[in-house]
Image (spheres, coloured by chain):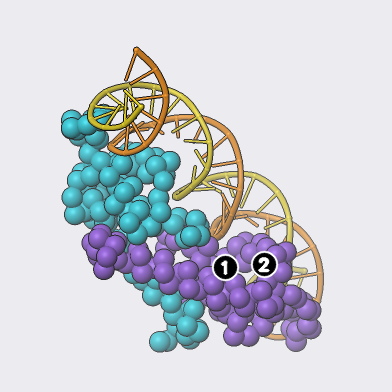
Chain colours: A cyan, B purple, C yellow, D orange
Amino acid sequence: MNIQFKKGILEICVLAVLAQKDCYGYELVSEISKRIDISEGTIYPLLHRLKDVGHVTTYLQESAGGPPRKYYRLTESGRKEEHEQKEEWMRFAASVNALLEGKNDAAE
Amino acid sequence: MNIQFKKGILEICVLAVLAQKDCYGYELVSEISKRIDISEGTIYPLLHRLKDVGHVTTYLQESAGGPPRKYYRLTESGRKEEHEQKEEWMRFAASVNALLEGKNDAAE
DNA sequence: GTAAGTACCTTGCTATGCAAGATACTGTGT
DNA sequence: ACACAGTATCTTGCATAGCAAGGTACTTAC
């Protein structure tokens, strides 16, 4: 898969999954990977960025077998951001599809 | 518009427009800009990349008012690339949409 | 003569994803 | 006891592609 396509998109994917339930990083990788490849080297910096700007908060929780998990929860601004980015993606995808279909007139 | 979204996509857009007709750089900017913002600082390096890998050839043509225009024409490999990247984009967009809609099961 | 439009180009910056590696805990097999 | 796989976190250095800002040069209009 073209790596470039994912630029900016993985952030929406993370926000969208977190909008449904709190997740820890490793879990997000496996959830998103069902549809789109994402590596751990991507998710952790991304989650830290989201925390830095206040779109998520974190809490630690023990796990049965393995180290403790750091869960991420969307904040209000995170939910707003998820909504806005989703809309922007929809508009963008529609524009690309129109262009690829040769509807270059911008009227359609 | 989120700049990151465009990464890799503008190349498909250029290929798609060139699949319909030969264009010069400045013309491509205005064609694509009807749907998606693209700057000249993006298009010229992109066109040079496409030429380097053999997806396009060029020819010069006089213009009425202004400097001569450098037209770009798709090669066979360019047409093939256009087709493949279009398909990849469709698959990618479908995956993203599924994820954003919460269809995390990969079965649907 | 100067501004705006056309048309080409380059340099330096930024953002994001990835591979590869480090760390550390648990459970299983030998 | 020891090694290995799985879980779970993280960091460093690299590659890529888009953009802003600038430069060049030609033509037409004021």
Q: Nearer the viewer, residue A3 or D27?
A: A3
Callout 1 secondary element = helix
Residue under the image location 33 percent in, 56 percent down: A34
For mark 1, name the chain.
B
Dot 2 alpha-carbon crowd within 10 angstroms: few under 14, some 14 to 19, many 20 or more: some
Q: Nearer the viewer, residue B84 or B18?
A: B84
For mark 2, name the chain.
B
Residue under the image location 40 percent in, 50 percent down: A38
Callout 2 secondary element = helix
Q: Nearer the viewer, residue B28 or B50?
A: B50
Pointers 2 and 1 in contact (CB under 8 A)?
A: yes
The reply to whether residue B14 is visible in this rendering is no
Total labels: the figure holds 2
Residue for badge 2: B50
Looking at numbered disc 2 in the image, what kind of residue is underneath it?
Answer: Leu
Classify residue B31 as left or right of residue B62. left
**Image coordinates for residue B80, horizontal then vertical, percent:** 61, 76
Classify residue A23 as left or right of residue C9. left
Residue B11's tag is 1
**Image coordinates for residue B100, horizontal then vertical, percent:** 28, 62
Looking at numbered disc 1 in the image, what kind of residue is underneath it?
Answer: Glu
Name the quadrant containing residue D23. bottom right
**Image coordinates for residue C29, horizontal then vertical, percent:** 31, 31
**Image coordinates for residue A54, horizontal then vertical, percent:** 27, 42
Q: In this picture, is A3 found above or below A55? A: below
Give the Cα distance between marks 2 and 1. Answer: 9 Å
Q: If you read the primary sequence from the N terminus, does the residue marked by circle 2 or circle 1 appear first?
A: 1
Q: Nearer the viewer, residue B33 or B65?
A: B33
**Quadrant for the C terminus of chain A in the image:** bottom left
